[in-house]
Image: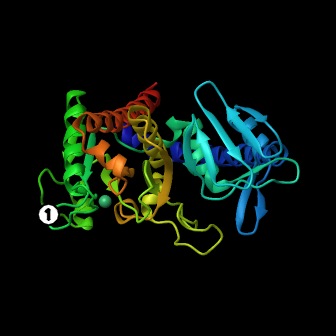
């Protein structure tokens, strides 16, 4: 009966009239709104400055945009701060300090005509995730943590002068972190739980098949320079930019799918590096950028931790000590828990 009424000639004529009216009204409203917003954008929003093929933002303007304080110590050093974060930069360099932790930028900070400038890439991949963390975490999960002990089987990884072997230390640390996370109620998946060899692609495949939400790969470092020591945490380099060990300005690989996690990666990496240093007091080699296979092919936010150098005699002795291993384990687990806590907060805010 209802169907017939709606399909009567009269209803159809009124329906057509009404639809036409609605369309015209919608057109007027939307064009006014679009026009207004275009004007607002032109009047209220500044544009980035082109420098070579990079876009840069004046830092005082970013301070206004993010609602943080800007303070310049002299014409080279300056700081952005709110209640939780303090970021300091130096003109001409790629080193920034975030709450005292070294964070490597993609591009150097430029002097600018009136004020120092930060590259748009570093605004997107560092500044914005750290100052507005929840915005970077709305599309990612937190429930299943994948821990990946580097190397294994006939691939020992780095070896230290007094007998330390990377694959064994990585597994010990990984199992320790898994235990702490499980005690905290987190679901953990391990890519390997014994001394078996595992290809890099299998580490990614297993993460995907296990339905992982984040990926943390554990390693120990080596260097021909036996003085080198300290901890560093790697996340994927942004498309078109130099990794931390490369010179900026050259031509570098374009973005890949895993770059969609740039914001979440920065947070996960920063939080782990911060807690790891807090627990161990290790030398800070920073949150760095690289295109390692497990970062480039990642199907979730992903970081790779190099907890210490086996080729440094003092550091090798420390990392072989179970009491010190416990600090490494606690630090990395705390960083992961800081991150999953933030993702949970982002989820809760979405529901409110
Ligand atoms: Zn390794």
The residue indicated by pointer 1 is: 153
Quarter of the picture holding the N terminus:
top left
Outermost residue to the bottom: 251
- 301 sits left or right of 194 in the view: right
Residue 259 horizontal/vertical position (percent): 47, 58
In front here: 218 or 51?
Answer: 218
Residue placed at 59% from the left, 31% from the top?
85
Residue 274 in view of the camera: yes
64 or 41: nearer the eye? Answer: 64
In the displayed image of the protein, which residue is found farthest to the right? Answer: 114
Res 297 quadrant in image: bottom left
Q: Kindly identify the residue that appears in the image at 38 percent across and 43 percent down.
A: 4
Asked if the residue at label 1 sits under 8 Å from ligand 1, the reply is: no
Above or below 46: residue 177: above
Q: Seen in the image, is 46 located left or right of residue 122?
A: right
Q: Which of 217/6 is in front?
A: 217
Quarter of image, ligand 1:
bottom left
Nearest the viewer among 260 and 93 is 93
Q: Residue at x 41, y 27 (%)?
A: 348
Residue 124, given in percent of the width and then of the height, sits at: 60, 50
> Which colour scheme appears in the figure?
rainbow
Query: Which of the 4 image quadrants contains residue 219?
Result: bottom left
The secondary element bearing badge 1 is classed as loop
Residue 244, image x, y percentages: 54, 60
Q: Residues within 10 Å of mark 1 (few under 14, many from 20)?
A: few
């Amino acid at each position: 009966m209802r169907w017939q009424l709606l399909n009567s000639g009269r209803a159809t004529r009124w329906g057509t009239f009404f639809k036409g009216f609605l369309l015209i009204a919608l057109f007027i409203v939307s064009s006014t709104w679009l026009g207004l917003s275009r004007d607002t954008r032109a009047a209220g929003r500044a544009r980035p400055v082109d420098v070579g093929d990079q876009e840069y933002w004046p830092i005082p303007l970013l301070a206004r945009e993010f609602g943080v304080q800007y303070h310049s110590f002299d014409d080279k050093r300056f700081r952005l701060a709110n209640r939780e974060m303090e970021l300091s930069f130096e003109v001409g360099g790629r080193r920034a300090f975030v709450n005292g932790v070294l964070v490597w930028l993609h591009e150097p900070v430029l002097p600018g005509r009136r004020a120092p400038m930060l590259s748009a890439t570093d605004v997107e991949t560092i500044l914005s995730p750290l100052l507005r963390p929840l915005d970077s975490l709305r599309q990612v999960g937190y429930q299943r943590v994948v821990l990946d002990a580097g190397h294994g089987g006939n691939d020992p990884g780095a070896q230290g002068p007094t007998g330390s072997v990377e694959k064994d230390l990585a597994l010990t640390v990984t199992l320790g972190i898994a235990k702490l996370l499980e005690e905290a109620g987190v679901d953990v998946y391990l890519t390997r739980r014994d001394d078996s060899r595992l290809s890099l692609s299998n580490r990614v495949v297993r993460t995907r098949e296990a339905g992982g939400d984040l990926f943390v790969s554990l390693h120990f470092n080596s260097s021909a320079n036996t003085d080198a020591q300290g901890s560093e945490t790697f996340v994927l380099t942004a498309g078109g930019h130099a990794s931390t060990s490369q010179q900026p300005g050259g031509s570098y690989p374009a973005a890949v799918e895993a770059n969609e996690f740039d914001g979440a990666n920065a947070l996960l990496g920063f939080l782990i590096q911060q807690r790891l240093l807090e627990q161990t007091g290790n030398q800070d080699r920073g949150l760095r950028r690289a295109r390692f296979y497990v970062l480039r092919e990642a199907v979730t936010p992903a970081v790779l931790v190099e907890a210490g150098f086996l080729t440094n005699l003092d550091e090798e002795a420390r990392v072989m000590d179970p009491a010190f291993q416990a600090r490494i384990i606690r630090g990395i687990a705390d960083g992961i828990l800081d991150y999953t806590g933030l993702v949970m907060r982002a989820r809760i805010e979405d529901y409110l």
